[in-house]
Amino acid sequence: MNLNPLRESELIETRRHFFRKSATGIGTAALASLLNPKLFASPAEPNKPNKKVDTGVVGGLPGLPHFAPKAKRVIYLFMSGAPSQLDMWDYKPQLQKWFDKDLPDSIRNGQRITTMTSGQKRFPIAPSKFKFAQHGANGTWISELLPHTASIIDDISVIKTVNTEAINHDPAITYIQTGSQLPGRPSTGSWVSYGLGSMNNNLPSFVVLHSTVNGGFGGQALYARLWGAGFLSTRYQGVSLRSTGDPVLYLSNPSGLDANMRRRMLDTLGELNDERFKSVGDPEIQSRIAQYEMAYRMQSSVPELTDIKDEPESTYELYGQEAKKPGTFAANCLLARRLAERGVRFTQIFIRQWDQHGNLPNDITRQCKIIDQPSAALIKDLKQRGMLDDTLVIWGGEFGRTVYCQGKLTRQNYGRDHHPRCFTKWMAGGGIKPGVLHGETDDFSYNVTENPVHIHDLNATILHCLGVNHERLTFKHQGRDFRLTDVHGKLVKEVLA
């Protein structure tokens, strides 16, 4: 027998229908939990802010922030593929004497390595071919690859001892972005949007920008789960802005549909969705209604955001002329500043092609030329506008690179495999103490010798800058309380202002 789809839907007795139609107290309680998921998604302990903070936000959880935040927003510059700390940040001059000698077994100490080098007969030491010099008040060593970043060294905190258990790209980047190597958890930006809400009703609270390299993307694939909402409502997932065509797909009205007609269509669709919500109580229906309305408002806000013709020439002197080309890392850094000005809570910029298993000197030189000036320009630009004090900027990848060579080794050319035991990130802005150099590694940049910083510690510190206690921002799912830092994480107090 063929049923009418609408009639078939009416006949399906879902669990939600059962509880909704029950006359008992448990039915009422279940209905309340479904219509207001925050009742079953509250933190493990009540949110009790130390003092009320007037942020003017839209949405967010009651009681957040937990304490007065130093940062209102985040800009995360993510170097997908893992930049080599040995060639950029972790200066090891004594390695020149170790050229082409085997990595001592006492240093590796049986640690796991990838299948890409596990079959090598030797693990020859590859010293960096790049020169280093000291910069800033603390005399921080920085590679010649990063002259512009060297100019802001007193504004940033460099952490040399970030570490992770993941050794391959996909689980590693999923881990650092979501707190779990397994897919399905909310991303950092989604947690922030869920907890703190939006500061602009006309733009998403979480925006994702993808940067081109030589006109394309290349490198390790990036999946939507890295900016996804996981088990949170889809309204908290990141919105990717495209560099060609419409910044957001389907944002423009179809041919023949004017603004008034679209408004009437959305009003009618909203009424239908509202009726459906009353019938089945699915909170995702409300999310869809909210997303349709956001898309409508974005029809005017996004074109204004991406129209950079009014930026003065001094802007391009600061960021570089590549900032005039949509989709470049420089253009995305400029766009991140414009998003920050408009109250976007979390902006994630991805740039790929850091996975340099071979021909590293040539490839890392290219990559650093792409990211060095814009990264430094973003810090300078925010600072001169008085925005750095309440904007947290983060730079880095998912793990580091090995001291030993992958493939053929010469003085001028070498490759490096994945290395999760120690890598470098830097942070700047709201909540971060400037000019700090934190942590130390051994003579081979292989193991942490002082002040390790696990990625859960890093994420706990990011949330702290936003006024969030990472142990109290939780969501109950499948019978347990989940959080970004899982059951780990401690603050890196040495870098906190």
Image (tube, rainbow, N blue to C red):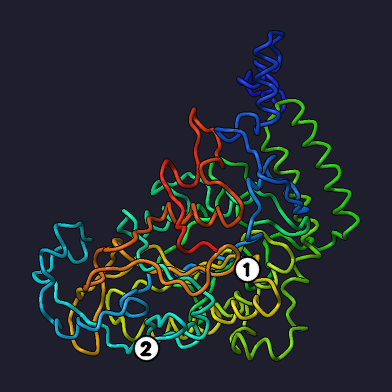
Left or right side of 295 for 78: left
Residues packed near mark 2 inside 10 Å, few (<14), some (14 to 19) or many (20 plus): few
Rendering coords of residue 330 (x, y %): 58, 80
Which label is found at residue 199?
A: none
Residue type at tag 1: Arg
SS category of the residue bearing label 1: loop
Query: How far across and down, in percent of the image, does residue 10 sit?
Result: 70, 22
Image quarter of the N terminus: top right
42 or 439: nearer the viewer:
439
Specify the farthest residue to the top: 24
| Residue drawn where x is 63% and y is 18% of the image | 13
Find residue 444 and report its horizontal and vertical position in percent. 22, 72
Does any portion of residue 194 appear in the rendered image? no
User: What residue did someone put label 2 on?
Assistant: 133
Question: Looking at the rendered structure, which numbered label has been put on residue 242?
Answer: 1
The correct choice, above or below, for 312 with respect to 20 in the image is: below
Q: CA distance from mark 2 to mark 1?
A: 38 Å
Q: Amino acid at mark 2?
A: Ala
